[in-house]
Image (tube, helix red, strand yellow):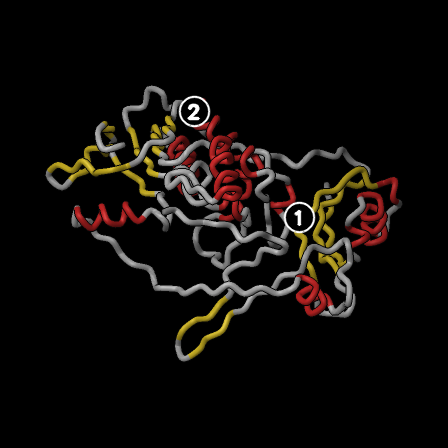
Amino acid sequence: MPRVVHFKTLPSVAANHLTLKKEIALQIAVKEEEIVGYHILKESIDARSRQPNLIISAEVFVNETFSDRKKQTFNWQNVSASKHRVLIAGAGPAGLFAALRLLEQGIKPIIIERGKDVRARRRDLARLNREGILNPESNYCFGEGGAGTYSDGKLYTRSKKRGDLQRILEIFYAFGADENILYRAHPHIGTNHLPKIIAAMREQILQCGGEIHFETKLTDFIISNGHLQGVQINHKEIVKGDALILATGHSARDIFELLHRKTILLESKPFALGVRIEHPQSLIDSIQYHCKTRDPFLPPAAYSLVEQVQGKGVFSFCMSPGGIIAPASTA
């Protein structure tokens, strides 16, 4: 039966499979050759001392058959003949994960997305960055994969009360994300890998009989006797459905205006004002890691700020070490 070991080690040791295996052998007092394999369960950085270390939990196989980390299986059903159809406005993370959840329930998802697919969208972003020409329907915010696909890729949250977060990471892993997102304290996929993962999700939805329509804009709700009958798209065609999930993100101002015109309840969230702050990465590294030069085996250092000022919360949203300033306009 695999053993679980918890230990602290240098980043340089953890960066190499052979040196990490040797460290694990020392930790559980066995010969190195007796370890046939291991899985990392958790990994975080402890930078409280002068020498930053990694805190690792690992599942170790000693003189027994090693098995690969199993990808969780999901009961995505074929819904081609389903009598129930749910419309989803938006093919960002909320829309895609809603569609996958509907497949598990045997309900046909029909996604309508105003922007383009993840590959075609890249060309519009290149034109925006190179020539300053904005496509109001295909940009950093609108299009398959949503805002995070080309401008972020972080997968961590302050909230631990919004459902099964580990299940979300398992789904990303099932669609091709690196397994390190399952155990790192701040999981991150990155824009170089996300498009392929998003495309794999799309293919799964289509293979199960779901529908995805790009360059298709929701322009009206079809309501009769207080019940939704469907939606109007592109100001002309009607698509019928039993229900509608709005997964449009915060930048779809026209949807908010449509809800207002239709006298549909729209609840506001508390207003938050964002201020961009830039620091040299070397400064953050020196403060967090207590060194003049960052250990090459450590990631760029990050920090978070949470404070109450006169009864109001002040907090840092997210960091993007070495990132770019993305022109995230939609109009």
Residue 168 seen = no
Within 10 Å of disc 1 (Cα), the crowding (few <14, some 14-19, many 20+) is some
Judging from the image, what secondary structure is the residue with disc 1 in? strand
Residue 176, position in %: x, y?
A: 59, 34
Amino acid at the residue labelled 1: Leu
Q: Residue at x 39, y 22 (%)?
A: 209
Residue 75, position in %: x, y?
A: 46, 30
Q: Residue at x 59, y 38 (%)?
A: 193
Residue nearest the viewer, comparing 249 with 139? 139
Judging from the image, what secondary structure is the residue with disc 2 in? helix
Please, is residue 291 above or below residue 258 in the view?
Answer: below
Q: Which residue is identified by label 1? A: 41
Amino acid at the residue labelled 2: Leu
Residue nearest the viewer, comparing 305 with 128? 128
Residue nearest the viewer, comparing 194 with 277? 277
Residue furthest out toward the top = 81
262 lies left or right of 77: left
Please, is residue 62 above or below residue 300 in the view?
Answer: above
Distance between the Cα atoms at labels 2 and 1? Answer: 33 Å
Within 10 Å of disc 2 (Cα), the crowding (few <14, some 14-19, many 20+) is some
Residue nearest the viewer, comparing 330 with 174? 330
Residue furthest out toward the bottom = 310
Give the image quarter of residue 224: top left
Q: Which residue is identified by label 2? A: 206
Give the image quarter of residue 208: top left
Residue 190, position in %: x, y?
A: 59, 44
Q: Earlier in the sequence, mark 2 or mark 1?
A: 1
Give the image quarter of residue 229: top left
289 lies left or right of 24: left
* Numbered marks: total: 2
